[in-house]
Image (cartoon, rainbow, N blue to C red):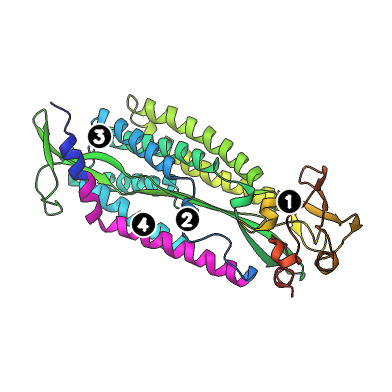
Amino acid sequence: MEFPIYEIIQAIGKMFINPLFYWIILISYLISHKRVKEERWQFSKELFPIGSEYFKTIHISVIGSICISIILLLTNTVFVREIILFLSVIIFLLSFTAGFRFLSATYSLGFTFILFKILEAFNNRLFDNGQITNETFSTIALLVALFLFVEVAMYKQIKNETSFPGITKSKRGSWFGHFHLQKASFIPFLLFVPGELTISSITILPYITIGNESVSFVFIPFMTGFHHVIIGQLPETAAAMLRKNNFLLGMIVLIIALTSFYLPGLALIAIVISLLGKLFIEQQITKANREQGLYFLHMDEPLKILQIVPGSPAHRLGFRVGDTIKKVNEQPVHSITELNRLLVKTSSFPTFEIISANHEVKNIGNNKYKGDALSLGLIFPFIEENSID
Protein backbone atom coordinates (compact mmCIF):
# COMPACT_ATOMS: atom_id res chain seq x y z
CA MET A 1 0.00 0.00 0.00
CA GLU A 2 1.38 3.39 -0.97
CA PHE A 3 1.46 6.06 1.69
CA PRO A 4 -1.99 7.68 1.39
CA ILE A 5 -0.91 11.32 1.68
CA TYR A 6 -3.96 12.58 -0.21
CA GLU A 7 -6.34 10.77 2.14
CA ILE A 8 -4.50 12.21 5.15
CA ILE A 9 -4.81 15.73 3.76
CA GLN A 10 -8.52 15.09 3.26
CA ALA A 11 -8.84 13.89 6.84
CA ILE A 12 -7.18 17.05 8.13
CA GLY A 13 -9.62 19.11 6.08
CA LYS A 14 -12.60 17.20 7.43
CA MET A 15 -11.50 18.03 10.98
CA PHE A 16 -12.84 21.53 10.41
CA ILE A 17 -16.41 20.25 10.17
CA ASN A 18 -16.17 18.54 13.56
CA PRO A 19 -18.20 20.51 16.15
CA LEU A 20 -15.59 19.68 18.81
CA PHE A 21 -13.02 21.77 16.89
CA TYR A 22 -15.19 24.87 17.26
CA TRP A 23 -16.06 24.07 20.85
CA ILE A 24 -12.34 23.98 21.69
CA ILE A 25 -11.95 27.44 20.15
CA LEU A 26 -15.02 28.77 21.98
CA ILE A 27 -14.19 27.37 25.42
CA SER A 28 -10.58 28.55 25.11
CA TYR A 29 -11.82 32.05 24.34
CA LEU A 30 -14.32 32.05 27.22
CA ILE A 31 -11.76 30.84 29.77
CA SER A 32 -9.19 33.35 28.56
CA HIS A 33 -11.74 36.17 28.46
CA LYS A 34 -12.77 35.45 32.06
CA ARG A 35 -9.13 35.65 33.13
CA VAL A 36 -8.67 38.99 31.34
CA LYS A 37 -11.80 40.41 33.03
CA GLU A 38 -10.37 39.47 36.44
CA GLU A 39 -7.06 41.16 35.56
CA ARG A 40 -8.83 44.35 34.54
CA TRP A 41 -10.81 44.38 37.77
CA GLN A 42 -7.88 43.63 40.07
CA PHE A 43 -5.11 45.55 38.30
CA SER A 44 -7.04 48.14 36.26
CA LYS A 45 -5.33 46.83 33.15
CA GLU A 46 -5.04 43.77 30.93
CA LEU A 47 -1.73 42.10 31.70
CA PHE A 48 -1.87 39.23 29.22
CA PRO A 49 -4.10 39.19 26.13
CA ILE A 50 -6.77 36.65 25.33
CA GLY A 51 -5.16 33.43 24.15
CA SER A 52 -2.06 33.72 26.31
CA GLU A 53 -2.85 30.27 27.72
CA TYR A 54 -1.56 28.91 24.42
CA PHE A 55 1.60 31.04 24.50
CA LYS A 56 4.68 29.06 23.38
CA THR A 57 2.71 25.84 22.80
CA ILE A 58 2.58 25.89 18.98
CA HIS A 59 5.73 23.78 18.68
CA ILE A 60 4.34 21.41 21.30
CA SER A 61 1.11 21.11 19.29
CA VAL A 62 2.91 20.40 16.02
CA ILE A 63 5.48 17.94 17.39
CA GLY A 64 2.97 16.24 19.68
CA SER A 65 0.38 15.88 16.93
CA ILE A 66 2.90 14.43 14.45
CA CYS A 67 4.50 12.00 16.91
CA ILE A 68 1.22 10.70 18.35
CA SER A 69 -0.33 10.35 14.88
CA ILE A 70 2.68 8.40 13.58
CA ILE A 71 2.55 6.03 16.57
CA LEU A 72 -1.18 5.43 16.07
CA LEU A 73 -0.77 4.82 12.32
CA LEU A 74 2.22 2.50 12.74
CA THR A 75 0.25 0.42 15.25
CA ASN A 76 -2.77 0.40 12.87
CA THR A 77 -4.94 1.83 15.63
CA VAL A 78 -8.64 1.68 14.76
CA PHE A 79 -11.19 3.46 16.94
CA VAL A 80 -14.88 2.99 16.27
CA ARG A 81 -16.82 6.20 15.96
CA GLU A 82 -18.57 5.56 19.27
CA ILE A 83 -15.23 6.00 21.08
CA ILE A 84 -14.60 9.28 19.26
CA LEU A 85 -18.15 10.45 20.03
CA PHE A 86 -17.96 9.70 23.75
CA LEU A 87 -14.45 11.18 23.99
CA SER A 88 -15.80 14.39 22.42
CA VAL A 89 -18.71 14.49 24.86
CA ILE A 90 -16.39 13.99 27.84
CA ILE A 91 -14.05 16.77 26.64
CA PHE A 92 -17.10 19.02 26.28
CA LEU A 93 -18.36 18.26 29.79
CA LEU A 94 -14.96 18.58 31.46
CA SER A 95 -14.13 21.88 29.78
CA PHE A 96 -17.63 23.30 30.29
CA THR A 97 -17.77 22.54 34.01
CA ALA A 98 -14.16 23.06 35.10
CA GLY A 99 -12.32 24.98 32.38
CA PHE A 100 -8.75 23.78 31.98
CA ARG A 101 -8.61 22.27 35.48
CA PHE A 102 -9.69 18.74 34.50
CA LEU A 103 -8.84 18.96 30.83
CA SER A 104 -5.76 16.80 31.15
CA ALA A 105 -5.87 13.87 28.73
CA THR A 106 -5.55 11.68 31.82
CA TYR A 107 -9.12 12.60 32.70
CA SER A 108 -10.73 12.79 29.24
CA LEU A 109 -9.15 9.57 27.94
CA GLY A 110 -9.29 7.90 31.36
CA PHE A 111 -13.03 8.51 31.74
CA THR A 112 -13.60 7.32 28.16
CA PHE A 113 -11.71 4.12 28.98
CA ILE A 114 -13.78 3.52 32.13
CA LEU A 115 -17.04 4.22 30.30
CA PHE A 116 -16.31 1.55 27.68
CA LYS A 117 -15.10 -0.88 30.34
CA ILE A 118 -18.54 -0.51 31.92
CA LEU A 119 -20.19 -1.08 28.54
CA GLU A 120 -18.07 -4.20 28.09
CA ALA A 121 -19.62 -5.69 31.21
CA PHE A 122 -23.05 -5.48 29.57
CA ASN A 123 -22.03 -7.50 26.48
CA ASN A 124 -22.31 -4.52 24.17
CA ARG A 125 -22.42 -5.33 20.44
CA LEU A 126 -19.19 -3.38 19.85
CA PHE A 127 -17.34 -6.02 21.84
CA ASP A 128 -19.32 -8.93 20.47
CA ASN A 129 -18.43 -7.87 16.91
CA GLY A 130 -14.77 -7.40 17.78
CA GLN A 131 -14.84 -3.67 17.03
CA ILE A 132 -13.43 -2.90 20.47
CA THR A 133 -10.75 -5.30 21.65
CA ASN A 134 -8.11 -5.53 24.36
CA GLU A 135 -5.74 -3.72 22.02
CA THR A 136 -8.18 -0.81 21.91
CA PHE A 137 -7.96 -0.42 25.67
CA SER A 138 -4.18 -0.78 25.60
CA THR A 139 -3.98 1.94 22.96
CA ILE A 140 -6.05 4.34 25.08
CA ALA A 141 -3.72 3.69 28.01
CA LEU A 142 -0.75 4.34 25.71
CA LEU A 143 -2.33 7.62 24.60
CA VAL A 144 -2.67 8.69 28.23
CA ALA A 145 1.06 8.14 28.74
CA LEU A 146 1.97 10.04 25.57
CA PHE A 147 -0.17 13.02 26.54
CA LEU A 148 1.39 13.06 30.00
CA PHE A 149 4.70 13.72 28.25
CA VAL A 150 3.01 16.49 26.25
CA GLU A 151 1.95 18.06 29.55
CA VAL A 152 5.53 17.77 30.82
CA ALA A 153 6.61 19.89 27.84
CA MET A 154 3.85 22.38 28.65
CA TYR A 155 4.96 22.71 32.29
CA LYS A 156 8.43 23.54 30.98
CA GLN A 157 6.97 26.66 29.35
CA ILE A 158 5.79 28.08 32.68
CA LYS A 159 7.76 31.21 33.59
CA ASN A 160 7.32 33.58 36.53
CA GLU A 161 6.96 36.65 34.33
CA THR A 162 4.32 35.10 32.04
CA SER A 163 2.16 33.43 34.72
CA PHE A 164 -1.24 34.87 35.53
CA PRO A 165 -1.41 36.69 38.89
CA GLY A 166 -4.36 37.21 41.17
CA ILE A 167 -5.07 38.94 44.47
CA THR A 168 -7.31 37.62 47.25
CA LYS A 169 -8.32 38.85 50.68
CA SER A 170 -7.96 36.22 53.39
CA LYS A 171 -10.58 35.48 56.03
CA ARG A 172 -8.57 37.67 58.41
CA GLY A 173 -8.71 40.59 56.00
CA SER A 174 -5.13 40.45 54.73
CA TRP A 175 -4.37 40.75 51.02
CA PHE A 176 -2.20 38.12 49.40
CA GLY A 177 -1.11 37.32 45.87
CA HIS A 178 -1.34 34.03 44.03
CA PHE A 179 -0.76 32.64 40.55
CA HIS A 180 -2.84 30.68 38.10
CA LEU A 181 -0.74 28.06 36.32
CA GLN A 182 -3.14 27.81 33.44
CA LYS A 183 -2.10 26.45 30.08
CA ALA A 184 -3.57 24.49 27.18
CA SER A 185 -2.41 22.99 23.92
CA PHE A 186 -4.33 21.85 20.84
CA ILE A 187 -3.03 18.38 19.86
CA PRO A 188 -5.12 16.84 17.07
CA PHE A 189 -4.17 13.29 16.12
CA LEU A 190 -4.76 11.01 13.17
CA LEU A 191 -6.14 7.47 13.34
CA PHE A 192 -8.28 4.93 11.52
CA VAL A 193 -11.99 4.31 11.94
CA PRO A 194 -13.88 1.36 10.42
CA GLY A 195 -14.97 2.08 6.88
CA GLU A 196 -18.30 0.26 6.99
CA LEU A 197 -21.23 2.64 6.77
CA THR A 198 -23.34 2.87 9.91
CA ILE A 199 -25.90 5.33 11.22
CA SER A 200 -23.08 7.32 12.84
CA SER A 201 -20.83 7.30 9.75
CA ILE A 202 -19.81 10.48 7.99
CA THR A 203 -19.96 9.41 4.36
CA ILE A 204 -17.63 12.14 3.11
CA LEU A 205 -14.63 10.73 5.00
CA PRO A 206 -11.78 9.43 2.81
CA TYR A 207 -11.50 5.64 2.71
CA ILE A 208 -8.58 3.27 2.11
CA THR A 209 -8.16 -0.49 2.48
CA ILE A 210 -5.75 -2.19 4.85
CA GLY A 211 -5.69 -5.90 4.15
CA ASN A 212 -9.32 -6.89 3.67
CA GLU A 213 -10.70 -4.14 5.91
CA SER A 214 -12.04 -0.84 4.66
CA VAL A 215 -11.01 2.00 6.99
CA SER A 216 -10.98 5.78 6.85
CA PHE A 217 -8.62 8.37 8.24
CA VAL A 218 -10.01 10.72 10.86
CA PHE A 219 -8.17 13.68 12.36
CA ILE A 220 -9.47 14.05 15.91
CA PRO A 221 -9.49 17.60 17.34
CA PHE A 222 -8.11 17.21 20.84
CA MET A 223 -6.84 19.47 23.58
CA THR A 224 -5.08 18.96 26.86
CA GLY A 225 -4.48 21.47 29.61
CA PHE A 226 -4.19 22.20 33.30
CA HIS A 227 -4.96 24.85 35.90
CA HIS A 228 -3.34 25.04 39.32
CA VAL A 229 -3.59 27.84 41.88
CA ILE A 230 -0.23 28.53 43.54
CA ILE A 231 -0.01 30.58 46.74
CA GLY A 232 3.05 29.22 48.56
CA GLN A 233 5.83 29.49 45.98
CA LEU A 234 6.85 30.99 42.67
CA PRO A 235 5.30 29.60 39.47
CA GLU A 236 8.57 28.22 38.12
CA THR A 237 9.22 26.35 41.37
CA ALA A 238 5.75 24.80 41.33
CA ALA A 239 6.03 23.99 37.61
CA ALA A 240 9.35 22.20 38.17
CA MET A 241 7.73 19.95 40.77
CA LEU A 242 4.71 19.33 38.54
CA ARG A 243 6.96 18.57 35.57
CA LYS A 244 8.96 16.02 37.55
CA ASN A 245 5.90 14.30 39.01
CA ASN A 246 4.08 14.13 35.68
CA PHE A 247 7.16 12.73 33.97
CA LEU A 248 7.45 9.95 36.56
CA LEU A 249 3.74 9.23 36.25
CA GLY A 250 4.04 9.18 32.45
CA MET A 251 6.91 6.68 32.58
CA ILE A 252 5.00 4.36 34.91
CA VAL A 253 1.85 4.50 32.78
CA LEU A 254 3.87 4.04 29.58
CA ILE A 255 5.59 0.87 30.85
CA ILE A 256 2.31 -0.64 32.06
CA ALA A 257 0.46 0.38 28.88
CA LEU A 258 3.07 -1.22 26.62
CA THR A 259 3.04 -4.38 28.73
CA SER A 260 -0.75 -4.49 28.49
CA PHE A 261 -0.52 -5.31 24.77
CA TYR A 262 0.77 -8.72 25.95
CA LEU A 263 -1.08 -8.85 29.28
CA PRO A 264 -4.41 -7.13 28.48
CA GLY A 265 -5.62 -6.79 32.07
CA LEU A 266 -2.85 -4.28 32.79
CA ALA A 267 -4.49 -1.57 30.67
CA LEU A 268 -7.07 -0.93 33.39
CA ILE A 269 -4.28 -0.77 35.98
CA ALA A 270 -2.47 1.83 33.84
CA ILE A 271 -5.60 4.00 33.69
CA VAL A 272 -6.31 3.70 37.41
CA ILE A 273 -2.70 4.61 38.24
CA SER A 274 -2.83 7.60 35.90
CA LEU A 275 -6.03 8.93 37.49
CA LEU A 276 -4.88 8.34 41.06
CA GLY A 277 -1.47 9.76 40.17
CA LYS A 278 -3.04 12.96 38.85
CA LEU A 279 -5.12 13.36 41.97
CA PHE A 280 -2.04 12.73 44.12
CA ILE A 281 -0.06 15.38 42.21
CA GLU A 282 -2.88 17.88 42.73
CA GLN A 283 -2.95 16.98 46.42
CA GLN A 284 0.80 17.64 46.63
CA ILE A 285 0.26 21.16 45.31
CA THR A 286 -2.47 21.72 47.90
CA LYS A 287 -0.16 20.39 50.61
CA ALA A 288 2.69 22.65 49.49
CA ASN A 289 0.36 25.65 49.53
CA ARG A 290 -0.72 24.82 53.05
CA GLU A 291 2.72 24.05 54.48
CA GLN A 292 4.68 26.87 52.85
CA GLY A 293 2.19 29.58 53.70
CA LEU A 294 1.46 32.70 51.68
CA TYR A 295 4.43 33.69 49.54
CA PHE A 296 2.99 37.09 48.57
CA LEU A 297 1.44 38.33 51.81
CA HIS A 298 0.99 42.10 51.73
CA MET A 299 1.40 42.69 55.47
CA ASP A 300 4.77 40.87 55.46
CA GLU A 301 6.35 42.31 52.31
CA PRO A 302 4.20 45.09 50.79
CA LEU A 303 6.81 45.78 48.09
CA LYS A 304 7.37 42.20 46.99
CA ILE A 305 6.69 42.17 43.24
CA LEU A 306 3.80 39.90 42.30
CA GLN A 307 3.99 40.53 38.56
CA ILE A 308 5.48 42.88 36.00
CA VAL A 309 3.44 44.51 33.26
CA PRO A 310 4.76 43.14 29.94
CA GLY A 311 6.68 45.77 27.98
CA SER A 312 6.70 48.23 30.90
CA PRO A 313 9.75 50.22 32.14
CA ALA A 314 10.09 47.72 35.01
CA HIS A 315 10.25 44.88 32.50
CA ARG A 316 12.97 46.64 30.52
CA LEU A 317 14.94 47.52 33.67
CA GLY A 318 15.15 43.85 34.65
CA PHE A 319 12.83 43.55 37.64
CA ARG A 320 11.75 39.97 38.35
CA VAL A 321 8.73 38.39 39.99
CA GLY A 322 9.56 37.75 43.66
CA ASP A 323 11.94 40.72 43.95
CA THR A 324 11.39 42.98 46.96
CA ILE A 325 12.21 46.68 46.67
CA LYS A 326 14.20 47.86 49.68
CA LYS A 327 15.66 51.20 48.65
CA VAL A 328 15.21 53.92 46.04
CA ASN A 329 18.17 56.25 45.53
CA GLU A 330 19.72 54.75 48.68
CA GLN A 331 16.66 55.66 50.76
CA PRO A 332 14.70 52.84 52.46
CA VAL A 333 11.10 52.31 51.34
CA HIS A 334 8.44 50.32 53.17
CA SER A 335 5.22 51.03 51.30
CA ILE A 336 3.87 51.88 47.87
CA THR A 337 3.17 55.41 49.14
CA GLU A 338 6.82 55.94 50.05
CA LEU A 339 7.93 54.39 46.75
CA ASN A 340 5.67 56.69 44.78
CA ARG A 341 6.80 59.78 46.73
CA LEU A 342 10.48 59.07 46.13
CA LEU A 343 9.95 58.37 42.44
CA VAL A 344 7.92 61.51 41.88
CA LYS A 345 10.21 63.91 43.75
CA THR A 346 13.53 62.72 42.31
CA SER A 347 15.02 64.93 39.63
CA SER A 348 17.38 62.22 38.36
CA PHE A 349 16.89 58.70 37.12
CA PRO A 350 16.03 56.60 40.19
CA THR A 351 18.06 53.53 41.15
CA PHE A 352 16.76 50.58 43.11
CA GLU A 353 18.11 48.17 45.66
CA ILE A 354 16.19 44.91 45.78
CA ILE A 355 16.26 41.54 47.49
CA SER A 356 15.77 38.84 44.88
CA ALA A 357 13.70 35.70 45.33
CA ASN A 358 17.00 33.92 46.05
CA HIS A 359 17.67 36.39 48.91
CA GLU A 360 20.45 38.12 47.02
CA VAL A 361 20.95 41.89 47.25
CA LYS A 362 20.95 43.46 43.77
CA ASN A 363 21.10 46.99 42.44
CA ILE A 364 19.13 48.04 39.40
CA GLY A 365 20.62 50.97 37.56
CA ASN A 366 18.53 53.23 35.43
CA ASN A 367 19.28 55.85 32.79
CA LYS A 368 15.95 55.89 30.98
CA TYR A 369 12.95 55.93 33.32
CA LYS A 370 11.49 58.77 35.37
CA GLY A 371 7.90 58.69 36.60
CA ASP A 372 5.58 57.49 39.33
CA ALA A 373 5.13 54.00 40.77
CA LEU A 374 2.08 53.18 38.67
CA SER A 375 3.73 53.91 35.33
CA LEU A 376 6.78 51.87 36.36
CA GLY A 377 4.71 48.75 35.69
CA LEU A 378 5.00 46.75 38.91
CA ILE A 379 2.13 44.73 40.40
CA PHE A 380 2.01 44.33 44.18
CA PRO A 381 -0.19 42.01 46.30
CA PHE A 382 -2.70 44.68 47.23
CA ILE A 383 -5.48 45.90 44.93
CA GLU A 384 -5.51 49.58 45.93
CA GLU A 385 -1.75 49.83 45.56
CA ASN A 386 -1.87 48.84 41.92
CA SER A 387 -4.11 51.80 41.06
CA ILE A 388 -2.55 54.46 43.30
CA ASP A 389 -2.95 58.03 42.08
Viewer-nearest of labels 2 and 4? 4
Q: Position of residue 175 (x, y in %)?
A: 74, 66
Q: Residue at x 66, y 56 (%)?
A: 308
| Residue 294 showing in the rendered view | no
Q: Which numbered dot is residue 77? A: 3
- Which residue is the site of mark 1? 322
Viewer-nearest of labels 4 and 3? 4
Spatial CA distance of label 2 from label 4 is 11 Å
Task: Establish if 69 lies above or below 385.
Answer: above
Q: Which numbered dot is residue 24? A: 4
Q: Which amino acid lies under the numbered mark 3 shown in the image of this protein?
A: Thr
Q: The residue tagged with tag 3: helix, strand or loop?
A: loop
- In the picture provided, is 36 more to the left or to the right than 335? left
Tell me which segment is drawn in magenta. Answer: 12-41
Q: Which amino acid lies under the numbered mark 2 shown in the image of this protein?
A: Phe
Task: Establish if 364 lies above or below 373.
Answer: above
Q: Position of residue 185 (x, y in %)?
A: 43, 48
Q: Which amino acid lies under the numbered mark 1 shown in the image of this protein?
A: Gly
Q: Residue at x 76, y 52 (%)?
A: 367
Spatial CA distance of label 4 from label 1 is 34 Å
Q: Residues within 10 Å of mark 1 (few under 14, many from 20)?
A: many
* Of the image marks 4 and 1, the number of the one nearer the N terminus: 4
Secondary structure mostly seen in magenta is helix
Q: Is residue 38 magenta?
A: yes
Q: Residues within 10 Å of mark 4 (few under 14, many from 20)?
A: some
Viewer-nearest of labels 2 and 3? 2
